Amino acid sequence: MAKRTIVAMPGDGIGKVVLNEAIRVVDAAGFTAEYVHGDIGWEFWCKEGDPFPVRTQKLLEQHKIGLFGAITSKPKDKAEAELSPELKSKGCVYYSPIVSMRQKYDLDICMRPCKTFKGNPLNFIRRGFGGVIEEPVVDTMIFRQNTEGLYGGVEWTNPPDQVYDALMTHKKFKENFAWCPRPELAVSTRILTKKYTTRIIKAAFEYAKSKGFDTVTVCEKPNVIRETSGMMLKIAQEMAKTEYTGIKVQDTNIDAQMMWLTKNPETYHVIVASNMFGDIISDGFAGLIGGLGFACSANIGPEIAVFEPTHGSAPKYAGFNPSIVNPIAMIMSACLMLEHIGENEIASKISKAIAEVVEEGKVMTYDMMKLSGKPDVFGKGAVSTSEMADAIIAKLK
Ligand code: NAI
Ligand code: MG
């Protein structure tokens, strides 16, 4: 069989380090692929005025599967200031390449697993009845709609006439906002479509069915955000009635869900939410299982899929040599990729190896030891990024 080709997009900062390590682990586990390098990130913004160059887009269109490290984004004024002088008058506008990628390729289904590794010193613990200390086992998959909603990018400050006039036809707008001078008005929309809402909910049901979970939790706020959260809940309830009769729909509000995060996270296995709420819940759950060093994600579209850790480029640590950051989030993102393309056995081999290393507790990166990230962490017993990958490779069987 021809080798599969994966587009490797390291990006900036620690993205470059962790992606390399993940490829090393995946290789050692027996996945033979060819990796083609895709330029992405701040460097290409500064040099070319485009952080997501067309040549990288072409690679993704051709090969369909991407592994992505992390990029650096900076505010508007910094973006303009760092642009190379000859590009300054060319009207380049910075957009985060990962957000552009999600929207351009309809990477609408974001899956963020949060699963407790036994023995992880960063696992959440709580006080139970009678003062006993409990360590709940979290096994939750968050399905986040990745392209619409509050992150859809449809927004204005000082909205143009047509938008303003349309808003004025709404009773609530007229009553509550008409007093505000237009230049002082900022509007960000939260647009949901039935098509993409249905797709994310269906993905959640399919996952629940495949794993034998009997409940899908829709985490929104339909009592207040009646139209969009309301549509999401209604579609889920309808789907449970018609297509997934063995699976119940549970309905939680985002605010209450954040409280329940620390009370009973072990009771949630499949959660589905719109873009921003999904982002919030998945960070919350990630905090229970070890934080950014352990949080991985899949961005899946109808044709193209890209896998990445949740963390960013951590510029503070980018120059450390050897690198101190935890590669596990990136390695687990590569496992999500392997599962997506049907290489379940290799994915499970790698997951088991990570679990063994964590449970043994002999090899830990600085974050797992709750050290502050300085070059002296090695003297305190922490291992480097490569040493963690080596330890995982040593456990592959
Ligand atoms: P960040 O995730 O890069 O780092 C925050 C802190 O988390 C770090 O200082 C470090 O203490 C810790 N951390 C992150 N990854 C870690 C790892 N693998 N192992 C151990 N500790 C880790 O977020 P920050 O500092 O807010 O953003 C830095 C840059 O990254 C910004 O330019 C931001 O725009 C960008 N970013 C990019 C993302 C992406 O590429 N998808 C996501 C989030 C931020
Ligand atoms: Mg986030």
Image: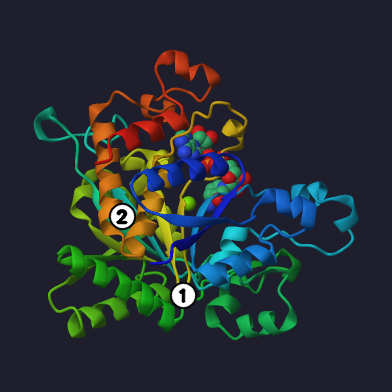
Please state the horizontal and vertical placement of residue 262, each as a whole percent of the image: 27, 43
CA–CA distance between discs 2 and 1? 36 Å
- Quadrant for the C terminus in the image: top left
Circles 2 and 1: CB distance less than 8 Å? no
Residue drawn 46% across and 49% down? 310
Please state the horizontal and vertical placement of residue 396, each as a whole percent of the image: 28, 40
Pick the front one: 25 or 368: 25
367 relative position to 268: left or right:
right
- Circle 1 Cα neighbour tier, 10 Å, few/some/many (<14 / 14–19 / ≥20): few
Vertical comparison of 334 with 302: above or below: above
Residue drawn 57% across and 59% down? 98
Amino acid type, label 1: Glu
Q: Mark 2 sits on what residue?
A: 256
Q: Residue reaching furthest top?
A: 379
Pick the front one: 326 or 391: 391
Amino acid type, label 2: Ala
Q: Quadrant of residue 223?
A: bottom left
Across the whole image, how many numbered discs are drawn on residues?
2
Q: Mark 1 sits on what residue?
A: 303
Residue drawn 52% across and 55% down? 35
- The colour scheme used to paint the residues is rainbow
**Earlier-in-chain disc, 2 versus 1:** 2
- Quadrant for the N terminus in the image: bottom left
Please state the horizontal and vertical placement of residue 154, each as a whole percent of the image: 61, 72
Secondary structure under badge 1? loop
- Circle 2 Cα neighbour tier, 10 Å, few/some/many (<14 / 14–19 / ≥20): few
71 relative position to 201: left or right:
right
Vertical comparison of 390 with 278: above or below: above
Asked whether residue 75 is in view, the answer is no
Residue drawn 60% across and 78% down? 174
Q: Residue reaching furthest left?
A: 130
Secondary structure under badge 2? helix
